[in-house]
């Protein structure tokens, strides 16, 4: 195995093992929480794809996430309780939202993109609060009926059922993302990130590619939102607010922008730390989040997934394998600290 | 004119108050090898940028094979058959040399098949003598290798017009022969416009030389004639001493 | 018609306040090269200073405003120190650090002052309606307009009539000038962040009776400032002025006219600005695109 593959396996392995063994390892509440966190994990994957693979750092993916979440809630209340249908429609709604927003937003790069997406995320949160008629305002959507995994199937109410459903959906979504990133399409997007001028000079329609990536990432975030609502059967502006955007970006920084496994693992870690901190030192959650953010920015220029290849160098050669193969998107070359700005 | 590939008339480019190009006329018949030389600040890179669509002129026209492309951006012109290299090689550093060349082929996952595209890309690398570097990430290549890789990326798209922006810049004496060999072997039908300081490269590659000075065309002639052109000498070396 | 006059006036006050804040943000970006996401928290420092230090007396108000300005300036200066080690790594890590600082500052303020919204106590004279041309206007808002306008005018004089101001404007107009000009970039950044922070803190204290002081204040002001900066053009102070006035009107008159559409109006305005201003990047020689992101 090559060095990069080792790193990927190193990250994906433990995550996968833990997730598969969870129903036997975790108690009911922890299982339920993990099911909820998987939805946030998909949001983190969406941010990782934009920030790392496309080189567009974002604080605004909570917007399509919210669209997917509220769409699912509304569909369920209107009688559509078939899980996969909810996911599909939520994903489509989020993608549609992203395409419209993206037309304006995808023209910017780097820090300006960050700024604009921050505004998008905040405005979405504000809209969730203001649009009383549709979103229920600050009270949120309640009375959301349970989903069913297949037509005529049992209602997903138990911790185990919800967990398996969430795990299955996440696995499919993450698998699809991984496949796309490995494909020639992934190389196109990474090319745009690395050298936009070269891509244009070779005839590529860069803005179109980035818009497609933005839309796809929006769909993934929307499916994450749908999962959230299916598990907790409730959604309010607090679920899709600013703190979540910050938390997820932090997870991506820690996990290494562009590494979807890193993003997933880090998302779980950050949520765990936040909840543990909230229990241990109530009210200090946001403070801890901010401090972690500052520390991460200073210490982890490429995130853990970026730092691991450095560690791999110390391994003996046969274990390390040959030169790194391209196309796996984990170079993190434009991750948080490479210092090279993308425009 | 039927066999004129590139026709530039009255090209004027301004950046604020600075006039980088002032009414430049240029006509390249198909297959010609033209070098553009001139002191620093003469407008050579602006010319390349204007020809590729990276910079919009305030006046003038650019025609490619009879088609007016003056308002077309870089991507559209590339699809019309223009390829370029940059002063500092522009490559996707996290991708391998092979992937970089594949990006130059421009197609997504469409036709022709992936296998044929990979073979064509590998052949492109071989023709430039860097076939062995196919699996190396571009960011890890030396400067001379990056230079050659960028030319491979430009050529794989089978362009009609190839614009080279100072290909010899930054090359060591050891790398130079390989570049000269590559430039001497460029496919026949490709029209080449080469911006360069290095006179060895100019004399080896160019049929005709255009001298730019302060955004204007000073002279256009064969390389040997340019060397003895009085106005050119004045521009490069200053006015000759008047005998008393 | 009459019934809209008060929202319009409120909107002007709101807009001028936003301008004072956004001017610091846009200059920090243009001349300092830093997207300061902690700017909203600097405003919040001033707002909380007003909530805590005012007691209905003029002295209290003056103290609050002074404290807010000083706290903001100090925070700005400290931030520039924290940003220094990241200067090599580029704009994004710096912006992310300011984001972390914003989170920390916001959390500290809530820990210190509680999660509720606080209201300052202003001198009773200002709290009344003032009669102008036979119509009644909220007194405090008129005062805010006066103060903010004076501050804006003073700032404008500094920017256009002094050498430092000219230098800052030149740097803001052309980010690539940062490296030359003979100025120490760290000093410029410290100066711009401190001045901007001071302005934000000042505006926070002055604006506290209007915008309040609570956990969401900093976020709201940051959001609006960012929109103002995008609308007005990065690094452009005159642009920020016009945009701030416009946003102020949307937030006051717009909320009255079409309450449910107000967030979308702002987003639509921002999207329009992006569509108009950001064309596909044109590449300068050498293939390296401009550092700030997008070609305005």
Image (cartoon, coloured by chain):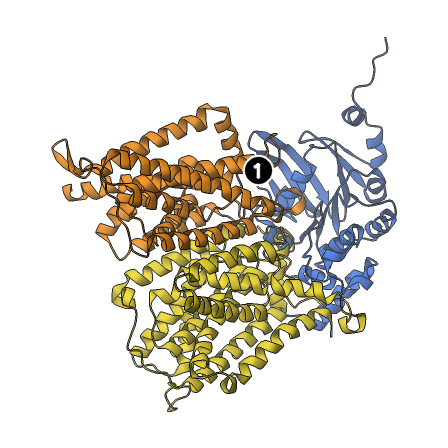
Classify mark 1: residues with Cα within 10 Å, few (<14), some (14-19) or many (20+): some
Q: In which quarter of the image is residue A252?
A: bottom right
Give the chain of mark 1.
Answer: C
**Residue C214: image location, x then y, percent:** 32, 52
Q: In this view, does A40 lie above or below A118?
A: below
- Identify the secondary structure beneath mark 1: helix
Q: Mark 1 points at which residue?
A: C186
**Residue B174: image location, x then y, percent:** 88, 48
Q: Does A240 sit left or right of C87 as displayed? A: left
> A121 or A245: nearer the eye?
A245
**Residue C296: image location, x then y, percent:** 50, 43
How many numbered circles does the render carry?
A: 1
> A211 or B234: nearer the eye?
A211
* Quarter in which the C terminus of chain B is drawn: top right
Q: Colour of chain A?
A: yellow
> C94 or B184: nearer the eye?
C94
Chain that is orange in the image: C
* Quarter in which the N terminus of chain B is drawn: top right
Q: Quadrant of residue C241?
A: top left
Residue lying at the far top in this picture: please name it.
Answer: B244
Q: Does B28 sit left or right of C187 as displayed? A: right
Residue lying at the far left in this picture: please name it.
Answer: C134
Q: Does A79 sit left or right of C136 as displayed? A: right
Residue shown at the point (82%, 32%) measured from the top left = B226
Q: In this view, does A279 lie above or below C182?
A: below
Chain that is blue in the image: B
Residue shown at the point (35%, 39%) measured from the top left = C203
**Residue A118 in sight from this viewpoint:** yes
**Residue B7: image location, x then y, percent:** 66, 42
Residue shown at the point (49%, 49%) measured from the top left = C98
């Amino acid at each position: 195995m090559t060095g990069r593959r080792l790193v990927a396996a190193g990250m994906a392995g433990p995550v996968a093992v833990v997730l598969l063994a969870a129903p036997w390892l975790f108690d009911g509440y922890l299982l339920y929480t993990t099911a909820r966190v998987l939805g946030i994990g998909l949001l983190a994957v969406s941010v990782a794809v934009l920030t790392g693979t496309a080189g567009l750092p974002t604080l605004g993916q909570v917007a399509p996430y919210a669209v997917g979440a509220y769409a699912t809630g509304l569909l369920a209340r209107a009688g559509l309780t078939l899980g996969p249908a909810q996911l599909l429609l939520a994903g489509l709604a989020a993608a549609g939202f992203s395409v419209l927003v993206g037309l304006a937003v995808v023209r910017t790069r780097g820090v300006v993109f960050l700024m604009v997406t921050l505004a998008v995320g905040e405005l979405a949160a504000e809209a969730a609060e203001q649009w009383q008629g549709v979103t229920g305002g600050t009270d949120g959507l309640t009375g959301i009926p349970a989903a069913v995994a297949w037509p005529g199937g049992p209602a997903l109410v138990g911790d185990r059922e919800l967990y398996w459903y969430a795990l299955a959906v996440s696995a499919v979504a993450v698998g699809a993302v991984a496949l796309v990133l490995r494909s020639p399409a992934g190389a196109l997007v990474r090319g745009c990130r690395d050298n936009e001028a070269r891509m244009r000079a070779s005839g590529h329609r860069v803005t179109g590619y980035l818009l497609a990536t933005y839309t796809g990432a929006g769909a993934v975030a929307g499916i994450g939102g749908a999962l959230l609502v299916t598990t907790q059967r409730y959604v309010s502006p607090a679920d899709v607010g600013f703190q979540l955007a910050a938390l997820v970006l932090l997870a991506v920084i820690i996990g290494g922008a562009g590494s979807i496994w890193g993003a997933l693992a880090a998302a779980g870690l950050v949520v765990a730390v936040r909840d543990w901190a909230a229990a241990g030192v109530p009210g200090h959650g946001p403070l801890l989040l901010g401090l972690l953010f500052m520390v991460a920015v200073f210490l982890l220029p490429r995130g853990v997934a970026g730092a691991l290849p450095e560690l791999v160098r110390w391994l003996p050669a046969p274990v390390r394998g040959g030169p790194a193969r391209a196309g796996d998107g984990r170079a993190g070359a434009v991750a948080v600290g490479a210092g090279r700005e993308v425009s | 004119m039927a066999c004129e590939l590139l026709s530039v008339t009255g090209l004027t480019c301004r950046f604020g108050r600075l006039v980088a190009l002032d009414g430049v006329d240029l006509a390249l018949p198909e297959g010609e090898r033209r070098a553009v030389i001139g002191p620093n600040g003469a407008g050579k890179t602006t010319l390349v940028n204007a020809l590729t669509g990276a910079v919009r002129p305030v006046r003038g026209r650019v025609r490619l094979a009879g088609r007016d492309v003056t308002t077309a951006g870089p991507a559209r012109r590339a699809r019309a058959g223009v390829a370029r290299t940059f002063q500092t090689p522009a490559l996707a550093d996290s991708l391998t040399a092979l992937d970089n060349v594949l990006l130059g082929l421009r197609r997504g996952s469409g036709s022709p098949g992936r296998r044929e595209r990979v073979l064509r890309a590998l052949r492109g690398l071989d023709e430039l003598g860097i076939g062995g570097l196919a699996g190396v990430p571009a960011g890890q290549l030396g400067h001379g290798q990056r230079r050659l890789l960028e030319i491979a990326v430009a050529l794989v798209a089978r362009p009609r017009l190839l614009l080279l922006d100072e290909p010899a810049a930054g090359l060591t004496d050891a790398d130079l022969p390989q570049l000269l060999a590559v430039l001497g072997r460029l496919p026949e039908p490709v029209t080449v416009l080469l911006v360069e300081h290095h006179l060895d490269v100019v004399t080896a590659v160019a049929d005709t030389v255009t001298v730019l000075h302060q955004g204007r065309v000073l002279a256009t002639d064969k390389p040997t004639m340019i060397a003895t052109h009085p106005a050119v000498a004045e521009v490069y070396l200053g006015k000759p001493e008047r005998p008393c | 018609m009459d019934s809209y006059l008060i929202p319009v006036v409120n909107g002007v006050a709101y807009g001028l306040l936003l301008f004072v804040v956004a001017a610091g943000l846009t200059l920090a970006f243009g001349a300092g090269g830093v997207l300061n996401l902690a700017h909203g928290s600097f405003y919040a420092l001033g707002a909380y200073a007003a909530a805590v230090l005012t007691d209905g007396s003029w002295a209290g108000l003056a103290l609050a405003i002074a404290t807010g300005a000083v706290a903001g300036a100090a925070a700005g200066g400290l931030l520039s120190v924290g940003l220094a080690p990241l200067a090599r790594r580029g704009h994004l890590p710096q912006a992310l650090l300011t984001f972390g600082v914003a989170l920390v500052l916001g959390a500290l303020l809530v820990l210190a002052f509680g999660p509720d919204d606080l209201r300052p106590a202003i001198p009773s004279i200002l709290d009344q309606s003032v009669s102008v041309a036979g119509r009644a206007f909220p007194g405090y808002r008129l005062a805010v307009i006066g103060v903010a306008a004076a501050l804006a005018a003073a700032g404008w004089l500094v920017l256009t009539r002094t050498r430092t101001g000219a230098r800052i404007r030149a740097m803001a107009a052309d980010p690539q000038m940062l490296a030359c000009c003979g100025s120490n970039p760290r000093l410029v950044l410290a100066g711009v962040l401190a001045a901007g922070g001071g302005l934000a803190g000042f505006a926070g204290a002055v604006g506290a009776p209007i915008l309040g002081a609570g956990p969401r204040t900093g976020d709201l002001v940051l959001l609006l400032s960012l929109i103002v900066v995008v609308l007005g053009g990065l690094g452009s102070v005159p642009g920020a002025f016009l945009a701030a006035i416009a946003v102020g009107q949307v937030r006051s008159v717009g909320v009255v006219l079409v309450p449910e559409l107000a967030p979308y109006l702002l987003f639509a305005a921002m999207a329009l600005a992006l569509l108009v201003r950001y064309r596909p990047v044109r590449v300068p020689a050498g293939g390296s695109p401009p550092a700030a992101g997008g070609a305005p």
